[in-house]
Amino acid sequence: MLKGLKYFFLTLLLAALGHTAFAQIPDVPYGTDTLRGARPAQSIDSVRKRLEGDKDTVIYSAKYVKVTNERLLNDSTQVFPIDTGLTNFENYTALMQPRSPRIHLGNTGLPQRALLFEPAKTVGFDVGLHSLDVYMMGPQDVNYYRARVAYTNLSFFSGAFSNSNADQVFRMVHTQNIKPNWNFTVNFNNTGSRGYYRRQNVSDLNAAISTWYESKGKRYNLLGTLFFNNIRTPESGAILNESVFTTGSLDKQQEAVRLNNSYTNHRNNGFYLKQFYYVGRIDTIQSASKEVAKILPTQRVAHTFFYNIQKYRFRQNEPDTYKAFPDYYFNNDISQDSIAVTSFRNEFSYSFYLRGRSVSFVKNEVKLDVGLTHDLFHFNQYVNDSLVNNLRDQVRRVQGKTYQNIKLNAKFSYRFSDRVLLDGDFQQVVTGYNFGDYLYDAKLTLAGGQRAGKIILGAYAQNNEAPLIFKNWISNHYVYTNTDIGKQQINNFSFNYINDKYKFDVKAEYFLISGYQYFASQTPGGIDAAPAQLNSPMNLLKLAAGKRFDFGRWHFEDYLVYQQSDYQSTIRTPQLYNYFNFCYTKMFFKVLDAAMGVNVRYNTRYQAPNYAIGIGQFYNSADLSFYTYPVITPYIKATLFRTNLFIMYDYANQGLQSNGYYTVNRYPMPDKQLKFGVSWTFYN
């Protein structure tokens, strides 16, 4: 029996081998497509087997997505790869940027201003409420994309301590091309936090929907953005315990504050549309990667339309028991101050370029832009007046006006070669509310070789009408009308040297400021903030230097600023600011690219400003300065596939040198806390 089975299995094996051998010989004429000649079942099986055996050779990455913004599109059509690296990833809020430090009231979302002198180079109508601007999203903050595949980035940052959260920040960017030449992008940001002390529960919302369309012939471009901002910030008036860092506190969330039912709400919504059309010859420079071409026009006409609604509202629904305000004008325990500003902007411009036909090496190129901007804006201001019709909650309009500005614009640039560039920007308001305002800005760039670096010589002159809040403001606790605040003039000269090869840059700036505008108390050490203007010219020198050292896996970075003025007690900024960072990088398990390091922030003592609730102004009052110590933050950050993440211990040295610190009078900064963040990137 077993012997019979042996021959039976041997026969089956020989039959199988024979079938396999004969299967290599086609049963169709030579040259015939075997797939078409096969039976349906055979063709399906063979296709399925081939598809299942093949590997997907397309791996989507950042190279399939390019990014640009409106500023980069002003001269030509150019795009760049998106940044997916870890540089500055741990400094996730506007309050933590190494080269633009801020003072603030306690955590992300609360009122802030620049620690150093950073004047805004703008011309035109200004309400003067900027304490929450860094949390806003506007057309200037929107990026435009070219996405060969759908791209999504999700980011989340949080700080945890006790039963509260210092920061909770969520950001989302999604972009994809509807057509090869038409892109659609959505931005969504949400910031919410309970804060370290009472009444710091911030709720911020930003959203933007944008699109970029480019015609197939590369002549017509359209940029459109619809944006929304809703910033809701509590106003605590600061804690009552002004010695919280010396006497200690068992639960800082239970520390009493001056105001328990007051808040500020800023809304900024609008629609932005820019169209430009290239006339005449179009030149093209191919990038080194051969993937992206830079489109250079010879003539361009452009039109910009901007519709914007800004609403500022302050709400107080409680008596001023602890004197957070100087006085009241309309209601002793309720404030409902608001101002709404609606503006329309139309801007027309024409540009032409003179250059040779060979653009592989651009030289002797001349560019001139001329334009006209018309701004129309209307504002209404309201207060809660208890005397109107004897109604406690009667809100009435106290003023409303309509203004307009007409501004002439001109930009000029002359590129002698790829080493020498001269450009200028000239803006002049020729009629309207801001008549006489101007900004004249010029720069000369001298570039050497890779080792030599480049030098940028700059100068600008600026003349500005005082913001509305300085000239004509009516609210329950602050009224300023018919003030004699004049224009402010700034003259600036700068020298900037940048060397990318050796990772070094230095900048020297000199400011001569006439008619410096600021807020100050009218009584020594008082809380009655009011507009003020310096009668004497103010000189200010600002020196900044940055350097990075790389020694194998060790990296050191330092940024130092020295600032000195002959009116240091008026401008109220520190003389010295320093940001130092060093880290060690290493690849773990061939997939985890990590950096472990520590950063240190430090500034010298300065006379701290006060904060005026209800008008969002930092003002000079008591000549009070606080001892300052370094703020040390160790961190670990890493990249794993398409995910970036970090964990850090902010202000880890608390208790070693100091128990806490202030940047604004009466508003303590957060204690040490653990923070983490993660950013996911998806390509579809």
Image (tube, grey):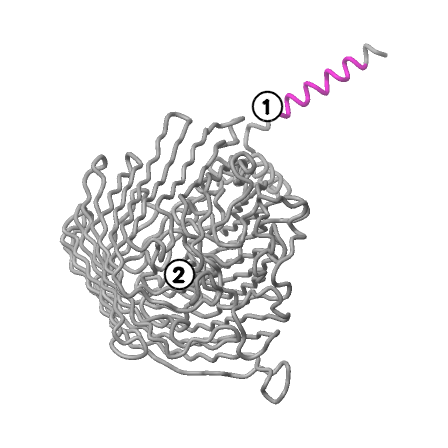
- Mark toward the viewer: 2 or 1: 2
**View extreme (bottom): residue:** 389
Amino acid carrying label 2: it is Gln
- For label 2, the SS is helix
Q: Nearer the viewer, residue 385 or 288?
A: 385
Image spot of residue 585 (x, y percent): 46, 29
**View extreme (front): residue:** 524
- The number of discs equals 2
Q: Is residue 133 above or below residue 169?
A: below
Q: Is residue 376 above or below residue 69?
A: below
- For label 1, the SS is helix
Q: Is residue 35 above or below residue 67?
A: above
Q: Which residue is under mark 1?
A: 21
Distance, label 2 to label 1, CA atoms, is 71 Å
Within-10-Å neighbours for mark 1: few <14, some 14–19, many 20+: few
**Quadrant that contains the N terminus:** top right
In the image, is 199 to the left or to the right of 465? right
Report if the CB atoms under discs 2 and 1 are less than 8 Å apart.
Answer: no
In the image, is 248 to the left or to the right of 114? right
- Which corner quadrant of the image does residue 677 belong to? top right
Would you say residue 654 is visible in this rendering? yes
In the image, is 362 to the left or to the right of 325? left
The residue range painted magenta reads 5-20
- Which corner quadrant of the image does residue 461 belong to? bottom left
Within-10-Å neighbours for mark 2: few <14, some 14–19, many 20+: few
Image spot of residue 249 (x, y percent): 65, 46
Image spot of residue 317 (x, y percent): 63, 71
Q: Which residue is under mark 2?
A: 140
Q: Is residue 8 magenta?
A: yes
Q: Nearer the viewer, residue 666 or 67?
A: 666
At 16% from the left and 58% from the top, the residue drawn is: 366
- Ranked by sequence position, the earlier of labels 2 and 1 is 1
